[in-house]
């Protein structure tokens, strides 16, 4: 198998030749997370308060909302690649492996969409009066 | 070996508890003051602090062992002695930075 014979490729065995792209994207998003999550931690530490109004007014700033959205995309992309490798190592049953990939993709895309939507709502609407 | 296992453990911990916590925080802030108050109440409970401190350590451990992976990717640091000392260094660094971050947080609260 290994590099894959013709019949092996037809049967979906052997390398799909997506490994290098996966590996590189894992590292690109790792650098993205490194920069953006450190930025979030430094920002939260230097904010005067973490109450509702302070946080919403801070996120509503375009210079915060945009990096925050990028951070969400980078995080969920990175975790999708990382958890995929973990599941490939531990889930051996073919059907279960397929199902776990399905759930992982729902989780990654759903989580990223929820995060980006929340940031967009805060940026466009701002503080909500109770 | 421990540092490699911990890279996976911390990564998956951050991917689940960390990411969900982050989304909860953002969703609560986007929903309104009451939802945000519920989040703050949970986050500042004893269990909430434990989770947040744990996630801080997980993040920095994953960050430092991730940086170690970048060095290993370049083909450096495979000699037994330097490999071992850099592995230990990731744990020392992550614990120090976690302690430092929470010292700032609790220091501000005082």
Image: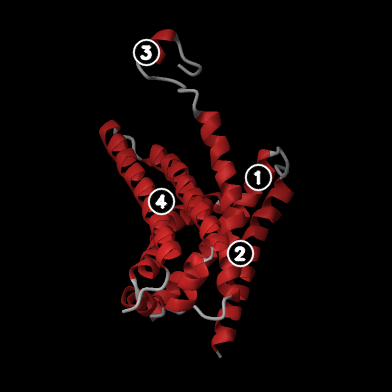
**Residue carrying label 2:** B94
- The answer to whether the residue labelled 1 contacts the one labelled 3, judged by CB atoms less than 8 Å apart, is no
Q: Secondary structure at mark 4?
A: helix
Q: Which mark is residue B104?
A: none
Closer-to-camera residue (B16/B95) = B16
| Residue, disc 4 | A112
Vertical position of residue A88 compared to residue A64: above or below: above
**Residue that appears at 51% across and 60% down:** A65
Q: Which of these two is toward me, A34 or A120? A: A120
> Residue A73 vs residue A103: left or right?
right
Q: Which mark is residue B70?
A: 1
- Which mark is nearer the camera, 2 or 4? 4
Q: Quadrant where the C terminus of chain A lies?
A: bottom left
Is label 4 in contact with label 3 (beta carbons under 8 Å)?
no
Horizontal and vertical percent position of residue A56: 45, 71
Label pair 4/1, CB-CB below 8 angstroms: no
Mark 2 to mark 3: distance in Å?
47 Å
- Residue B51 on image: x %, y %: 43, 70
Q: Are marks 1 and 3 on the same chain?
A: no
Q: Nearer the viewer, mark 4 or mark 1?
A: 4
Q: Viewer-proximal residue, A61 or A49?
A: A61
Report which quarter residue B44 is drawn in.
bottom left
Tell me, yes or no, if residue A100 can be seen here: yes
Q: CA distance from mark 4 to mark 3?
A: 34 Å
Q: Secondary structure at mark 3?
A: helix
**Same chain check for tags 4 and 3:** yes
**Discs 2, 3 touching: Cβ within 8 Å:** no
Q: Earlier in the sequence, mark 1 or mark 2?
A: 1
Protein chain holding label 2:
B
- Taking the view exactly as shown, the residue that stands out farthest to the bottom is B110
Across and down, in percent, residue A2 comes to 49, 19
Q: Which residue is mark 3?
A: A10
């Amino acid at each position: 198998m290994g590099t894959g014979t013709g019949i092996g490729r037809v049967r979906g065995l052997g390398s799909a030749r997506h490994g290098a792209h996966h590996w590189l994207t894992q590292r690109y998003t790792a650098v993205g997370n490194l920069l953006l999550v450190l930025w979030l931690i430094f920002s939260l530490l230097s904010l005067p308060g973490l109450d509702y109004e302070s946080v919403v007014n801070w996120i509503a700033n375009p210079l915060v909302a945009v990096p925050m959205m990028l951070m969400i995309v980078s995080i969920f992309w990175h975790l999708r690649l990382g958890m995929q490798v973990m599941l490939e190592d531990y889930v051996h049953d073919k059907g279960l492996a397929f199902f776990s990939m399905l759930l992982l993709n729902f989780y990654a895309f759903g989580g990223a969409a929820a995060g980006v939507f929340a940031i967009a709502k805060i940026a466009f609407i701002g503080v909500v009066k109770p | 070996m421990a540092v490699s296992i911990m890279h996976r453990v911390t990564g998956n911990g951050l991917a689940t508890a960390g990411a969900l916590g982050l989304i909860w925080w953002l969703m609560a802030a986007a929903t309104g003051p009451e939802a945000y108050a519920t989040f703050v109440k949970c986050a500042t409970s004893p269990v909430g602090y434990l989770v947040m401190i744990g996630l801080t350590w997980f993040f920095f451990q994953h960050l430092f062992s991730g940086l170690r992976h970048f060095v290993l990717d370049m083909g450096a640091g495979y000699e037994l002695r330097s490999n071992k000392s850099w592995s230990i260094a990731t744990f020392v660094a992550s614990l120090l930075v976690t302690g430092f971050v929470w010292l700032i947080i609790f220091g501000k609260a005082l």
